[in-house]
Amino acid sequence: MIISTDRLLARTVIVAILIISVIGCDRTDDSKDKLSVKTSIIFLHYFTDSLSGGINDMAAVFNSRNQQYDLKPTAINHESFETSIRYTLKSSPPDLYSYWAGARTQSILEDLTPIDRVWQQYQLDQCFSPVIIKAACEYDGHKYFVPLTQHYIGFFYNKKIFDTHNITPPTTWDEFLVVCEQLKNQQIIPIALGIREKWPAQFWFDLLLMRTAPYSFRSQLMQGQVGYDNPVVTAVFETWAQLIERGYFNAEPNDLSWDTGANELVYTGKAAMTLVGSWVIGQWTDAQHQWVAGRDFDFFSFPIIDPIIPLVSTGPIDGLVVPGRAVNKNGAEEVMVFLTEAAPQLAMSRGAGALAPSLKVSAQEYDTVRQRMMQEIMHSAHFAFPYDLSTPPPIADLGINAMTEFLEFPAERQQIQQRLADDVAHWFTINPLHQSQ
C-alpha cells in the first residue's frame, strides 16, 4: 500500500516528537539521579523486531567495561527511522545514530559532526580495510562513519528441501531456472518474496542489473548519467517478469512482509529459498527458530548470467554517526572508538547475522556460512551498497515504488519503466550536482 504524502508527513512528525520526548526523558532522569556515576549516551537506532539481534549485547559489552558512560540504545522501526531522522537532526538529536553507509549518510552530512580528530588519535585506519574506509567512512574528504556490521545479499535456502530433492545450489542462471522448475513441479514455492515494506524488492532489480551489465553502468545509472529507459534496464525488467510469469514466486508478494512472511515460508518448508540479506541468519538462529547455520539453512550467491561481467557482491554496512547538535559529543566519540574493538563487534555480528567490519575480529569466530560469505566478498571485483544506499534518497524512493508496482502489475512494465525514467530524469535536471558525486 502506498501511503499518501500527507499521512506519511503527519506520521513522521508524530514519531519525531515522541523520539525527542524519549531522549529528553532519558537525559532528565539521569540529571535527577544524584547517585548516578555515569553519564548517559543516547543511541537512537533502527535495529528492531527481526533486525534487533546483537544491539543490546553490544551495548552491554560497552557498559560493563566503561566507568564513565552508560550507553542507552533507543529503538525505532526501520521505516519510521528513515524519515524521522531528518526532523530530529535539526532539533534535539541523540548523541549517536545508527545509519546506512553510502548515499544515505552523504545526504545528511551537513547535520553531522566529522570525527577526523578521534579517528586520527585512535588510529582507526588500522581497524578497517582501506576498501571499507573509502566506501563507508569517508565523505568529502572527512571521516564521519564508524562501521558496525557488514551484510551480504544472497539466496538463503532450506537445506532439508534441497537435500530431499537432491538439489545442488545453482551457480549459473540456466541452472537456477532448472532448480526453480523442479521445485515448482514438487508443489514447493521456489522463491519466497515479501515486499510489504517495499525495500526488499530492490535486491532483485539490483542483482539482475549487476549480473548483466558492467559495474560502471550501474554507477552511471545511480548518478543519473544513464537513463532508466536504457535497453539494459528494460532487459532487467524482462528477465524479472519471466520469473513471475513462470510462477516461481509466491502469490501477492506486495501483501507479505519480508520477515514474518517470506522468511517464514522458507523456515516452514512452504518455500525453498529467498533473496535477502544475511540478517536472516539472526532471525533463523534466534530462540524462537533455533536453526543452525550450515545444518538447517545455507546460502548461495546470485547466479552468474553473463560470465563476462566481473562478479559484484552487495550488502549494506550499518554504523554510527554523531549529530552536529549532539549534547555529549565526547561521550559519543568514546563509544564509537570502543565499538571498533573485537568484543562489541563480535557481539553485534553474532546477533545480527552479519560480518564484523573490524579487522580485529578473526574469521575463525564465524560459522561456516559466514566464512563463505566473507570469501564471496573477497573474491568479488566490487562490493556495492544496495540500490537505496547507492543513489540519492529521492531517486531510491522513485525506483523502489516502481519495482513494487511492477511486481503487482508486471504486464504494465513498459509504462512503469517509462514513468520511472521520466521522473528520475526530471529530478536530476533540477538537482544537477548529484550527477557529479
Image (cartoon, rainbow, N blue to C red):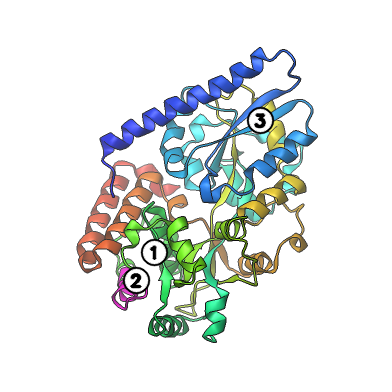
Identity, as a three-letter code, of the amino acid under mark 2 = Trp
Q: Earlier in the sequence, mark 1 or mark 3?
A: 1
How packed is label 1: few (under 14 Cα within 10 Å), some, or many (20 or more)?
some
- Residue at position x 46%, y 80% from top? 176
Mark 3 Cα within 10 Å, few/some/many (few <14, many 20+)?
A: many
Residue 246 sits inside the magenta stretch: yes
Check if residue 216 falls in the magenta segment.
no
Residue 332's disc number = 3
Q: Nearer the viewer, residue 40 or 414?
A: 40
In 3D space, how far apart are the residues under numbered discs 1 and 2 (Cα atoms)? Answer: 8 Å
Going from N to C along the chain, the mark reached first, 2 or 3, is: 2
Q: CA distance from mark 2 to mark 3?
A: 44 Å
Residue 27 placement, left or right of 304: right
User: Above or below — where is 128 with respect to 8?
Assistant: below
- Occupied quadrant, residue 377: bottom right
In-image side of 236 versus 103 (left or right): left
Q: Secondary structure at mark 2?
A: helix
Locate residue 180: give its quadrant: bottom left
Q: Is residue 198 visible?
A: yes
Q: Nearer the viewer, residue 140 or 17?
A: 17
Which SS class for mark 1? helix
Would you name the residue on which mark 2 appears? Answer: 240
According to the image, label 1 marks what residue? Answer: 205
Q: Earlier in the sequence, mark 1 or mark 2?
A: 1
The magenta segment is 237-248
- Contact, mark 1 vs mark 2 (Cβ under 8 Å): yes
Residue 265 location, x and y as percent? 45, 66
